[in-house]
Image (cartoon, helix red, strand yellow):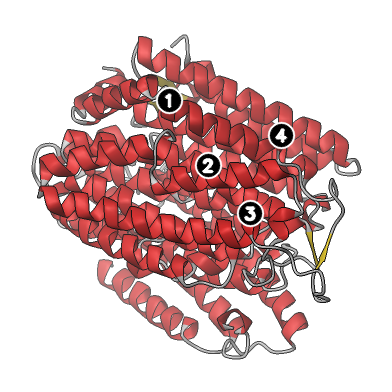
Amino acid sequence: MAFFFALAIGILVALGVFQILRRDLIKAALGFALLFTSVNLLFIAVGAFDGNRPAYYVDGPAAQPSDPLVQVLILTAIVVSFGSFALLLAIVNMISRRYRTIDSDEVSQLKK
Amino acid sequence: MDYAILIIGAIFFPLSGIILSLLAFPSRGIQHVIALATGALALLVSLTLLAANLTTGPVVVNIGGWEPPYGIVFVADLLSSLLLVMVNGVFLAGIVYVLSCQDRSVSFPVFTPLFLAMLTGLNGALLTGDIFTLFVFIELTVLSSVALVALSDDVLGLEAAMKYIFISSMGTLFLLIGIAGLYATFGSLNFADIAQALATGERPLLSEVALVMLMSAFLLKSAVFPFHFWQPDFHTTAPTPVHAMLSSIVVKIGIYGIIRVITLLFLDEASVIQGFLVVLGLIGIFYGSLGALRTYDGKRMLAYSTFGQIGFILVGIGWGTPLALLGAIVYIFNHGFIKASLMMLMGVVVSYTKPKTARLNGIVGVGTRVPPIVGVLFFLGGMALAGLPPMNGFISKVLLVRGGVEATDVWLSLGLIVGAGILTLTYMMRTWQQVFQQKFDETRTDIKIKAPGQGDSYFAPLVLIGVNLALGVFAGPLIYAAQLTVEQLGNPSVYITAVRLYGG
């Protein structure tokens, strides 16, 4: 199971980094969404001692449950990353209106 | 536990200020009263917290009564409370500056809540004893400052905000990966608990990966050399009060994280990290000072100068002896007040131009049309930044040189401080002469000067320069507190036992 987690995280990070490096600002912003998801998956993988067990049993096998703390952590991380993603999209939206482009090469008035 | 309520207060007051000022949005006056009241209360609380630390020792509060490491714990040791006093003192002056600021962005109803959100994030990040909570509070500061810069009067603010949020999201990812690594290794997020596990000398698989990730994130938040390129743009385009806060206190959060990592958590690796910090600091000092020397914009010059001053602090931490660390901590404290006052004075000068510009060729001679005391204050601030007596900058540089003489070569440290001091003096005094000494060209048509009293008030920088002078003349109490801080940092078991892990 750890292998699949590692594979999924790796693919998500690769896709996210590829998207960030593109010129299109919206695609770059979406790349961050992928990267944040990959970090959330990393947290889940950290807490899953034994693969895909739930965090809490009401009844059922008396085996070791998964660690509940990481699930709380990713709830917080999702909220924070959602906030920064929303702000990022809002800024890209304003940029597309003011500059009439979303090509990051053309949004470069600061260089002057 | 008697003082525990103070820690809650330091976070509760600005947090309640956000909500109350959002509710009071139709009236700017009520928003300002709320901001002033919460800022003053937070300063009062942080001063009491420092006094409590000096008399009885670290103050700890377990949120919700849960024992650490299961619950979230807030710890105010001497380092936290000393920096808390600096942050809240500078921030109160920032709020006072906002009252009279003529920027259009300051009149937006969301400005005051976002400004207070920055303070909440800073206070929380300094006080928390839990690394995930540290991440949340740092994000609060970062996101509110991005929003504030995006609504700046400067049309380039939006572009700078976009640049910073991309960089800072990357930093957030680094920080999160570091936290995941620490949690995977030690099963805990509590600083004291992790420190206890690391003190055994064992280094399980992911702990050093986590160290690298955490250090990268903190260096990025402080704009240290390889991660610095966003800083001048982001700081220059910010509204004046926000710029003063960003360049003086927000950059110190990363420094605080670095000090925590090398004095509490990764003690065995500290010498390696310190070697890196000295090199990065040296690059920062000269790159920042030379950048400030040849830039074209008054606000940008001060942003570059911050980059150089952060370099001094890093070099002090990097030398690593108690004396050098003492110098670095006094430097952190003093630089907050110096840089905020200079930034506000530059803002006062810039606010008298119409259309508003901070270009050095645009503000030549503008200083002769503002109240004359602004020129005097700017001169005193320049002296403090360059490290001339009787200002507090002199005290921090002397302490740093003493640390350097003890830790390394005499000539290296002396040459460093004197050389960088001369560079600082050059760019500050050149700007002072251009702005306050040269005559304003009456025939210019591109820039008009507002009538006296139409610009920002110089009251807040006046107070800050007064504090700088007082800290320079009566430096004893600050040095005493910083000495105790260094003693406490040298002995991490004080922090660990204060947290009372597992109810012990």
Tell me which chain the residue with mark 3 is part of. B
Amino acid under disc 3:
Met
Left or right: residue A58 compared with residue A106: left
- The label on residue B88 is none
Residue under disc 2 on the same chain as residue under disc 1: yes
**Foreground pick, B484 / B459:** B459
Disc number placed over residue B473 in the picture, else none: 1
Mark 4: which amino acid?
Gly
Instruction: Check the picture and name the quadrant holding the C terminus of chain B.
Output: top left
Residue type, label 1: Val
Image disc number at residue B17: 4
Q: Nearer the viewer, mark 1 or mark 4?
A: 1
Q: Is residue B331 visible?
A: yes
Q: Which residue is mark 3?
A: B346
Task: Indicate the position of residue B162 as horizontal and vertical percent values.
Answer: 60, 72
Q: Earlier in the sequence, mark 3 or mark 4?
A: 4
Q: Secondary structure at mark 4?
A: helix
Residue type highlighted by circle 2: Leu
Q: Quadrant of the N terminus of chain B?
A: top left
Which of the pair B65/B253 is nearer the observer?
Answer: B253
Which residue is identified by label 2?
B380
User: Marks 1 and 4: same chain?
Assistant: yes
Are both tags, 2 and 4, on one chain? yes
Please state the chain letter of the residue tagged with numbered disc 1 in the rendered image.
Answer: B
Q: Report, in whole angstroms, how far the alpha carbon at label 1 lies from the one at label 4.
A: 35 Å
Q: Earlier in the sequence, mark 2 or mark 3?
A: 3
